[in-house]
Amino acid sequence: MARTLHVDGNSGKAYIYKGDAAPATYANPSAAQLGDLHFHSDLSYLGNTQVLEATITHPERIKSSSKPKFGSRQYRTQQGAQSYVLGINSLGAIRPAVAFYGGAQMPAGTVVHKVGQSVRAVSVMVTASQIRLYENWLTFDDSLPAISRTYRIFLFQTLFAGSGNTSIRIAPGEFSAGFGKLSTSYRYLRRADSTPDAFVTAGRTGDVQGGGIKVVLPDGSVPVQSATYTGSFAGVPGTGVRI
Amino acid sequence: MSATFEAVNNVIRVRDTNGAVVFDTGTPMPHIAQVITTTLGHTFAASGTSRDRSISYVSAFASGCREYQYICRTEYVCRSVYRCRQEYKCTYNYSTSRNECGYVTVCGNEQECGYEQVCSGEFVDVEGYEANEVALVAAREHSQTYTLGTLPTGTNPDFLLVLISASRTRAGSQQDYGTFISAIPAGETICANGSTILETAFQPNGEPWLSRILSVVLEGDTVRAQFKHSNRAYTSSTVHRSQSCFTFPSGFAPLDDTRSDWTITFEIYAGKFTT
């Protein structure tokens, strides 16, 4: 199917669409026409992803117990929280992100260490200046030894507003269109059906049943399924993307 | 090397000065169709609770229970009794040289013994009543869905990127291991694509017996948040003991309160690929 690049000299709008319909068709696209557009200067895009990988050594969490003069040792629940800096937020603003623990995309609240009923779970926090990790831990009759875990985060820059007044510019060192929204200065999130860097999804990635939990990632992998889970959640396929 | 723009075989492609593909109509780049920001509160209602009880008796020696009783005992009792009896006595009379006989009364103290019932009121040690109780949580499955926003009809987005800022304003707990564990930092922005594990409670073997998740999903052009709760029946490991002198004690074990309240602010990027 033909592809059409159109730049409007009056409005300055630039757009690339499927087919060879009259350009005016897509000047102000309706919701139903969005799927026809490869690029439109009125739309917003994701690009210049910050990739951050960090290994955190979670410290030992020692169980708490007491031993009365007569009677057996008694354990007490201990619970606490700690946050860690994974790295600087180079985008300087809170933006959507995809987090990985080990090799798998990580739902917020993922348990990353468990000994008996002692456990630690984490979420990835995004602040305007840092990307951080939040840990909540609990010990009972088992201590949690210090352990290293590696996290990877893709933080997506959002391109909502154009800049300047250039509709299209093709120069030896630069291609720019749509007031800078389509530019060789950016790396855009793009679809990748093979060996994607990450998956995006519109569906659930987890389910609970029988008190247990099952996580099925958009790539179909199952990083978490507790023995107590009794459901049949098979996951919702996502779309692979390359940064 | 120069940046390049190509339009070849129905493909438009842009490369940067390193030759890397920046744009290619064959590998579409998604756009953000809409950003939805909203806040909602959700309560995970408490699961049903009850108590399980086992009973036993405590020996009178150990119970510390005393009771006023009218007690009769059979006792062997001896007492001194002043008693007179008629005796037939003969006395020789020298003046008449004859025995003179007749009945005379003889009195004196005598020991008299025998068994008899002795009764009195007194406090005595008695058996006590003892009960051991544990708290039970009934199994429950529940889910609730909220609409967070709706995109223009026909948009049909392909994916969501979700940021949330959540606060647990009331935390469920179990007496065995305390507050349900949650790795959601209060008031901080976290990435929450797909499903987020809000709370978990573990049983002694380390497997969860209660799990709660939040999923942000698309249904056509509508963005919804689904809060799902699941817990299996749970019997507390903490045993509470109570004794009573009058009846079996009951209802003394504290119950687990599994209710949690959440307030969550969503920032949702609805994305769409070229179809």
Image (cartoon, rainbow, N blue to C red):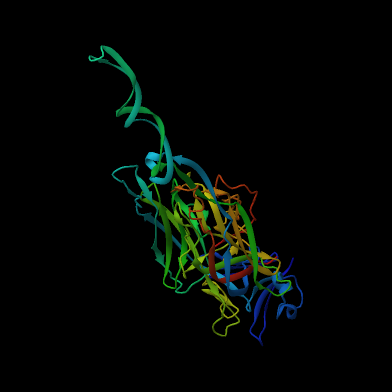
Identified at 76% across, 78% down, the residue is: A22
Which residue is at the front of the view, A200 or A67? Answer: A67
Image height check: is B69 above or below B215? Answer: above
Which residue is at the front of the view, B172 or A57? Answer: B172
Image height check: is B111 above or below A183? Answer: above
Identified at 60% across, 79% down, the residue is: A178
Left or right: A176 in relation to B130: right
Which residue is at the front of the view, B24 or A120? Answer: A120
In percent of width and height, residue B42 lies at 58, 67
Left or right: B21 in relation to B95: right
Residue B268 picture quarter? bottom right
Query: Does any portion of residue A74 appear in the rendered image?
Result: yes
Query: Does any portion of residue B88 appear in the rendered image?
Result: no
Q: Residue furthest right?
A: A21
Identified at 51% across, 47% down, the residue is: B207
Residue B3 picture quarter? bottom right
In percent of width and height, residue B110 lies at 31, 27
Image height check: is A91 above or below B88? Answer: below
In percent of width and height, residue A167 lies at 61, 82
